[in-house]
Amino acid sequence: MISIGGRTRTCGLIGYPVAHTLSPLIHNLLAEATGQDMVYVPFPVEPERVGDAVEGAYALNITGLNVTVPHKSAVIAHLREMDALAEKIGAVNTLVRCEGGYKGYNTDMTGLQRAMASDGVCLEGERVILLGAGGAARAVAFLCASAGVEAVYLLNRTPARAQEVAAEVNRVCGRDCIRPLAGYGELPEGRFLAIQGTSAGLYPHVEDTPIADAAFFEKVHTGYDLIYRPGDTRFMQLVRSHGGRAFNGLKMLAYQGIHAFELWNGVYVDEALAETVIQKLRKETEIHG
Ligand code: ATR
């Protein structure tokens, strides 16, 4: 346990609610393992108080904050600077103290990219199927476009939303790489990396999947589900039963925290320590579901 003293730096999380967050576990573990004199505390901040919270955090000399629902977009109006990827996405989950305020980052997406890299999945030049067109999938579409994918085939239960997201991401990124499809029957030949970015299958609706057709899963060589509760989703099971490799969102959760920790403390977290974080998160999510 870190001993809190006069030089201890404070980081934290603003969101509403924050009671079930796993982030203190990630950051307090990392602080202890790397010898950083830092603590991490969740702060429940009501929707209309986000500006006051950022200003107050700066006045209190807080080093950095994570940002979660419902503040990820609203907080941007209160920041001094924006990282380029976060600016494109229009959502931030990490604030880093800078001259006169905070700079906003989106480590959800850098974390996803790093999690994938550690599993041997590289977005550059890849053809990707992306399921979903909500907040999470939209951010993934921006990541894919920025990371040099060859193409993203975007599928959503409501195709009109997929068309809107594709048009927006293509416009902002200046590339024509996001292709909305009306159904998976429109996919070209071959097998693809499929990223599951819908909320279907999330605990407690563990039997849900955005798609169950065998003909779809035959086109998937690797399935990446952003969900980590449960750790093995029906989508992942279907990927594996058709011969593909399947991953859940637990590593993404770990790496979004790791990248934020690195930005706040100016240190690098290696794969061995990242693995310790992942194991701890796995244990915690298995215990509490
Ligand atoms: P988030 O911020 O987690 O992305 P969201 O913005 O509410 O959440 O988006 C939820 C996404 O999951 C949407 O793409 C939604 O599809 P629709 O646009 O058709 O609503 C998708 N989704 C949710 N439940 C689903 C289900 N049972 N089957 C298929 N897609 C589902």
Image (tube, grey):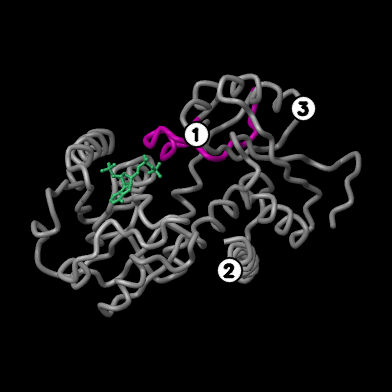
Which numbered disc, 3 or 2, marks the residue that appears first in the sequence? 3
Q: Residue at x 25, y 77 (%)?
A: 242
Which numbered disc, 2 or 1, marks the residue that appears first in the sequence? 1
| Residue of label 3 | 60
Residue 27 point in image, percent of width and height: 69, 52
> Which quadrant holds residue 8?
top right
Magenta stretch in the rendered image: 82-100
| Residue of label 1 | 72
Please, what secondary structure does the residue beneath circle 1 have?
loop
Residue 191 versus residue 36 in the image, above or below: below
**Figure quarter occupied by ligand 1:** top left
Q: Is residue 95 magenta?
A: yes
| Residue of label 2 | 271
Q: How many marks?
A: 3
Which numbered disc, 3 or 1, marks the residue that appears first in the sequence? 3
As measured in the structure, the alpha-carbon distance from the residue carrying label 3 to the one carrying label 2 is 33 Å
Question: Label for residue 45?
Answer: none
Mark toward the viewer: 3 or 2: 3
Q: Residue at x 24, y 69 (%)?
A: 220
Residue 152 point in image, percent of width and height: 22, 53
